[in-house]
Image (cartoon, coloured by chain):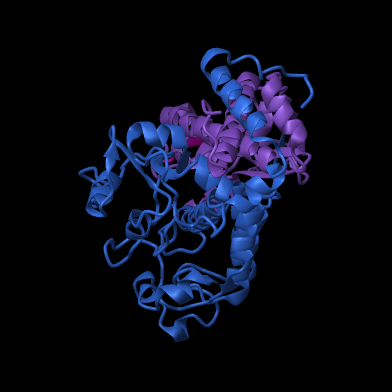
Amino acid sequence: MNLLRIKTEIRDEAARALIRGIDDRASLNKRIGLAAKALTREHLSKIAIEKHGTAQRLGAEPTGHFKEAAESINMAADADGAELRISHRGGLARAVRPVDIAPTGGRSFLTIPVHAAAYGRRVREFERNFGARLFRPYKKGAGKVRAKALAARGADKKLVFFYALRESVHQDQDRELLPSDDQYAIAAKEGVARWIGHVAWLRGIDAGGA
Amino acid sequence: MRILVPAPFEEAVSSLRSRGIMPTALSSAQIRDLGAALRATSIFSARTTHARYVQDIRDAVDGILSGKLSKAEAKEILIRKLAEYGYDPERGFPGDRGLGIPPAERGSLRDLGSSRRLDLILDTQLTLHRSIGQKIQGMTPEALFDYPCWELVRMRPRRIPRGSALSGSPGWPERWESCGGEFYRGRMIARKDSPVWVALGDSSRWDDALDVDVPPFAFNSGFSWLEISREEAVALGATSEDDAVAGTPADPRESVSASVAGIDPDIIRAALRGIRAEIAEDRARLAAPGGAR
C-alpha cells in the first residue's frame, strides 16, 4: 500500500486554545477529512476531463480511469486524525512515488495498446472480442527476429499492429495527480474554520458579540 | 492527514455486500418490470442465468471496491470464468436454449463476454456503489452542514454524448431541467435532499434510467457527483446560510457539540474571529508541511 502523509499545523492561538479544550477531536478531524476529500475529488474530476490524450490520439473511447479514481475517494476520521482512502488500483500510486511496472504471471512482456481497438483492453479480452489470435510477426528484413509487437492480419491480409511489447515500464512520480501539500493545508484550514463556525452556530454564538 | 492508495471504500463495499444475486433469463426491459425494490436488493445482469457467474460479477466488483483488483484484472477473471462455465455467445450457458434465450452476436452488448458488456456491468455497479458510499459519507451531520449540495458534473468524456444529434437520447441538462433542477451560473447544483436526484434516475421518466437516486442514474452515464461547500452554495444561491438539509439527524448537535460542551463561549468566539481572518488574509499560516497537529 502506498502512503502519502500531509501534515498541517494550526498556529492561530485562539483556534489552538479551542482545540486544546475539546475532549474528542474526531468531529474536528472529520471536517478536515471532508474538506480534503472534496478537494481531491474536484481535482481528479478535472483531470478526468482533461487527461485522455492517449485515447484521443488512438481515436478510442476514454476508459474513465480518472472518473473512477474520483468516485473512489473516501474518508475516515477519528480522534487521532483523518485519512483519505483511494480505493482504485492503477495510476494514482504515481502521485505517491515513481512506479516500475513489470510483467506478472510468468509473462515476458507488458502489452501497450497502439490501436483504438486495443485501448483499455488486455490481450485476452481483445482476442475474445475479435475472435482473432494475435501473434508476433517477424521483423521485416531481420531474418528470424520477431518484432516486439502483437499483430493480426486484416481481411486484406495486411498486418495490423495492436500492442507494443515492453519488458518493463518506468513511470516518474507525478505529484500533480493529487492536490499539492499547500492545497491540502488550505483545505484543512477550511475544515477547521467550518468546524468552528458550526460549533458557534449550534451554540448561538456570534463572532462579533460579547 | 494520511492518504492511502489503494484502500477499501468500506461504505461502497457494504452496499454491494448487502445485495443478493439474481440469476435471470429476462431481458433488460423485462427486468425493469420486476419492480424497483427487487432490483435495489440484487446484483443481476440481463439474460445471465448462471448463478455462479453472477456471484463472480459480484466478487469482481467487491475486489475492485476493496482496492484488491483493477478493472482490467476483473474483466480477465470474468472472461476466464465464462469459458470455464461453457458460455458461448451463440448458445449461451449450457441449458440456456431451453429457456428461450436468443443467440448473441460475438462482441455485441448481448454477448456476456464482450468488452461492451463487461464494461457496462462493471462501470454501472462500480459507479452505483461508490456513489452510494459517497451519499452515506455525504449525509452525516458534519457533511450536510459543510457540503449541503451536490453538483452533477461530467467526469468522463464521450465520443457521442447524450443530447448530441447521434445519441438519440436527451442530454443531462435537458433531463435536469425537466426534473425541476435549477441552473446556477449554468451549473447543475441542488441540495442533497432535493427531489431532483430521485427524478433523474426514475425509469418512468427515462427509458435508460436505473431507478436509483445516485450516479450513474442511467446506463453508460459519464456524469457523477461533486460536493459543493456551504460557502459556495450560498454564494450561488443554491441554499441559504440558515438552511438545514433534510437527512440531518433529529439532534445534529450531538456529534459536534458534545465534544465542546465545556468550552467557554469566549474561546469559541475568539477562534471564530481568528480563523475567519486567517482564511481571508493568510493562506500559509496553517500550511506548514512537517509541522505537528
Residue A15: x, y in percent?
67, 26
Q: Give the image quarter of residue B204.
A: bottom left
User: Which residue is at a point 74% across and 42% down the rendered structure image?
Assistant: A107
Residue B11 pos. (x, y %): 62, 56
Left or right side of B229 for A74: right
Q: Quadrant of the C terminus of chain A?
A: top right
The letter of the purple chain is A
Of residue A53 and residue A134, the one placed in the foreground of this image is A53
> Considering only vertical position in the picture, is A52 above or below A79?
above
Q: What percent of the width, then of the height, locates residue B183?
A: 27, 40
* SS assignment for the magenta stretch, majority: strand
Q: Is B147 or A42 nearer to us in this picture? A: B147
| Magenta range | A157-161
Q: Is residue A99 visible?
A: no
- Residue placed most toward the observer, A143 or B192: B192
Q: Quadrant of the N terminus of chain A?
A: top right
- Residue at image coords 40%, 59%: B108
Q: Position of residue B167 (x, y in %)?
A: 26, 48
Q: Residue at x 74, y 38 (%)?
A: A22
Residue B115 appears in the rendering? yes
Q: How many marks?
A: 0
Residue B93 occupies which quadrant of the picture? bottom right
Q: In the rendered view, would you say B212 is above or below B239?
A: below
Give the quadrant of residue A175.
top right
Q: Is residue A135 magenta?
A: no
Q: Tell me if residue A130 comes above or below residue B45 in the rendering.
A: above
Which residue sits furthest left?
Answer: B165
Q: Colour of chain B?
A: blue
